[in-house]
Amino acid sequence: MVIIWMRKIKKFTLELIKEKNLQFLESFSNSFSTMQVTVVLLKPSAVQRGILGEVITRFEKKGIQIVGMKMLCLTDEMVSEHYAHLAHKPFFGRIKESMQASPVVAMALKGVDVINVVRQLAGVTNGREAAPGTIRGDYSMSVQENIVHASDSPETAALELARFFSESEIFTYPHFLHPFTYANDEL
Ligand code: IDP
Ligand code: MG
């Protein structure tokens, strides 16, 4: 069942890559039996509160490989695309303002099942309800000012990688901790 589901996602992602001309993502999706790349945005709430280092450290300590990282100011177009699913909400204008209140830090993170792992590390959307130990649970008291964005599926991860990074900004390099992070049969 899981294998059929994975195959369907892979087929969908490969079609998306072809349709949108995102060939440079092909190597990620080909190898994504379980190895994935996800996108995290450290929002203005993280930048302004001076906790970038602490949040980044959490990903590193978990054993996740950073394969891209940069600071950028989100354009109107980027935010509108990124939060298109919330465009009809009354608070959409506020979210946009909040995401453009300062630069953000965009990260591309690689690991086995990393999309789900990072969503779990982030915690639920509302910082007041997020479990202690999660990023939002430990650093946020707000729904809107909730420190991080994390891709929620292989399809959105592929789109977000292309939205925030160019091909030359994503790196492939040996992760020397792999033998101590995963068992052979998990890679
Ligand atoms: P997620 O970030 O946990 O995936 P989404 O529902 O995709 O949550 O919402 C995207 C972002 O929009 C949230 O992280 C949060 O910053 C903001 N947001 C979502 N719902 C609300 C709301 O009800 N009020 C204010 N901001 C919201
Ligand atoms: Mg979301």
Image (tube, rainbow, N blue to C red):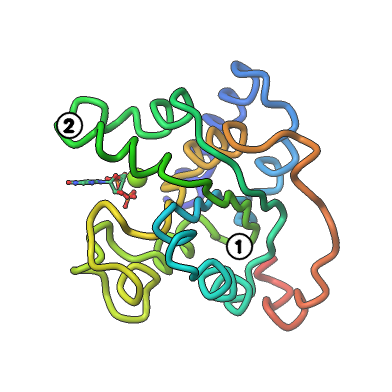
Q: Is mark 2 within 8 Å of ligand 1?
A: yes
Give the farthest residue toward the left: 90
- Residue 67 placement, left or right of 75: right
- Secondary structure type for disc 1: strand
Residue count near mark 2 (Cα–Cα under 10 Å), binned few <14, some 14–19, many ≥20:
few
The amino acid type found where label 1 is placed reads: Val
Residue count near mark 1 (Cα–Cα under 10 Å), binned few <14, some 14–19, many ≥20:
some
Q: Are marks 2 and 1 in contact (CB under 8 Å)?
A: no
- Secondary structure type for disc 2: loop
- Residue 168 placement, left or right of 127: right
The amino acid type found where label 2 is placed reads: Lys
> x%, y% of residue 20?
60, 18
Residue under the image location 49 percent in, 56 percent down: 42
C-alpha span from label 2 to label 1: 34 Å
Q: Which mark sits nearer the N-terminus, 2 or 1? A: 2
Name the mark nearer the viewer: 2 or 1: 2
Residue bearing mark 1: 112
> x%, y% of residue 23?
73, 27
Residue bearing mark 2: 89
Q: In front: 113, or 128?
A: 128
- Classify residue 58 by image quadrant: bottom right
Rendered view: 45 above or below 93: below
